[in-house]
Amino acid sequence: MKNNIYDKYLVEEKMPTMWCPGCGNGIVLQSIIRAIDEMDLDPEKIVFVSGIGCSSRAVNYLKFDCMHTNHGRAIAFATGIKMANPELKVIVLTGDGDCASIGGNHLIHACRRNIDLTVICMNNSNYGMTGGQYSPTTPLNSFTKTSVYGSYEPPFDLCDLTKSAGATYVARCATYLPVQMKDIIKKALNHHGLSFVDCASDCPSLYGRLNRLGDAGEMMLRWKDRLVSVTQSQKMSEEELKDKVIWGEFVNKSDRMEYTDIYKENIRRAKEAAHE
Amino acid sequence: MTMGSYRIMTGNEACARAAIASGMRFFAGYPITPATEIAELCSELLPKEDGVYMQMEDELASIGAIIGASATGKKAMTATSGPGFSLMQENLGWAYINEIPLVIVDVMRKGPSGGSATLPAQADIMQTKWGTHGDFRALVLTPNSVEEIYTETVRAFNLAEKFRQPVILLYDAVLAHMSEKIYVPDKDEIEVIDRAKPASKEGYNPFRYSDSSVQPLGHFGEGYNIHMSGLTHDETGFPVSNQDTTGLEILIHHLFDKIDDHYDDEIKKYEAYLCDDADVLVVSIGITSRSAKSAVKKARAMGIKAGLFRPITMWPFPHKDLSRYDIHTKAIVTAEMNNGQLNQVVIEDIDRNQKLVMKNLYDGNQIRDIDILNSIIEANKYEK
């Protein structure tokens, strides 16, 4: 079937993807291109920037201007692109290790600036590309190649982190909810300011296998009982929320100026000072 | 005809002003002694030119941001010193492999590590050539006066645009902070090379490896569908398979050929002062070369045939030209503020009948002309 969204936005000759069967990254990538298509955005004015890891390989399949950068540095490169041409829609594709560990500093500073980037994190709770080591989002006591007795590293909640750092749109979704994921990404892309979307995803080949969570299908079904919407969660006790994953919007506000707009104001001031 | 003007300014001021005169409209940096004044002046001047000054969270982000800006069409620069330059190495490698025009200023201070922030040194010579991992050809310029910082900054931007790659401007804390009278050329007097535009968007590839010319860089956001990756890639910018060893090699060849094939005519630059009949040749760069020149004059007054060979394009080093002069000399003196880097380069150009005398100082002081003169006198005693 021609003229479908795959032909329009994906590079056919790069298929099949390098992702393992059952990997959640394909669902995230599909949600992104569906969102772009439904919003009818001009593909020429969209730039994808990624770092290193399974998530970041997504740019290999995209028919857009793409920059596959160094590990953790995608947001820094993206900041330069956005500041050089604020007309562009700049989307950062990253993973939990890429944006919360090695690139954590760039993430929080982009949130602090509230620069108009959309950061989409494919969060699969481990370093997949290097064979399944624990990451900053690996749940306590779970097994990875570097936590064979159970992880002893307290994990980050990336939505709490970006919210505290000043992001003006923060949401979480899961590969179990692809339609909702697409809708959340649409809102993130529409948002003027730093938007962060935490996409809870699965790595059946490594994290799943090491924690005996079954195959990709079984792992997917596990989300059914674990996902709780923000609205539902407000009626639940802390005890009831244990082991649950809250999805939905955590922050959606426009009370802070966006960074490229702030910078335009700086230019105005500089020119005014030159006149005096 | 419009004319420029004579002004008194520091090396760092000359660098910032020359960058803006060259069309630089994007500076991202992180404060560090002794380079900070470049950032300060850029933060003041760039907004007036609709340019961007960004103070990033660290040096890794600084060079990341200027790479992004350059790919989006801005002439971009950062300025740092050794500790920050060390942090920039990974993204610098990304800029080499993706052939991104950039100018990086490294104002050298005494190292290693934090070293002595306010004391000068010339110990980053090798780091500018080999700093990041992998094979690539570095372009490094080493001015020796405030006026030359101005002209070499302009040349750095032109070389970066012409050969699509990072260019490093390397000078030390003394040149950064000393004030000198310089000629500031008028806008019309400065030759500014702007980026070549691709002929067409249709079937555009961001890279060309078939010959030593560089592919014009299409900008992000203009409909070229550009793919760039830090992974070994082919002309399309997409990663090549690790099984395709020819593909892996072609990229490296190109990074060398595009510089080497144009080196003699367009990149090489050095000063040869009284070199033609010299018995003793002093090789020196930057601030130390000024003491060296004074020492050469004093040696000549004493009847010693001394000369100064000063690379202004430090990397790639003008080996052929130094060899041409040093073939008749009996000894070479290297003078540098480190424990031996330039001498390792020069040793390639001398034969076993020639003597190498090293004058090194790495206590944070400058090398005086009298000290270099003593080295010249010692070298002159040697019988070939």
Image (cartoon, coloured by chain):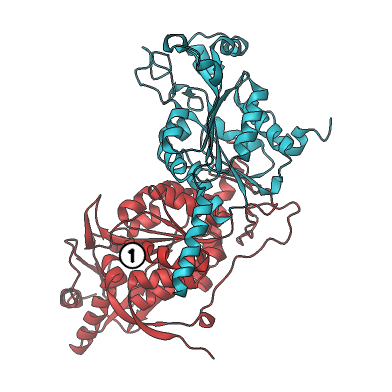
Chain colours: A cyan, B red
Tell which of A179 and B189 is nearer to you. A179
Decide: few, some or many residues near mark 1? Use Cα within 10 Å; few <14, some 14-19, many ≥20.
Answer: many
Q: Which image quarter: residue A173? A: top right
- Count of residue discs: 1
Q: Secondary structure at mark 1?
A: helix
Extreme residue toward the right, this view: A1
Give the residue pinned by disc 1: B37
Q: Amino acid at mark 1?
A: Glu
Quarter of the figure that contains the N terminus of chain B: bottom right
Q: Is residue A152 above or below residue B362?
A: above
Tell which of A250 and B44 is nearer to you. A250
In-image side of B288 versus A170 (left or right): left
Q: Is residue B285 above or below residue A241?
A: below
Q: Is residue B56 above or below residue A165?
A: below
Image location (x, y in percent) of residue B279: 27, 80
Residue pictured at 71% horizontal, 38% vertical: A39
Residue A198 visible within the image? no
Extreme residue toward the bottom, this view: B1
Image location (x, y in percent) of residue B263: 50, 68
Residue pictured at 72% horizontal, 62% vertical: B199
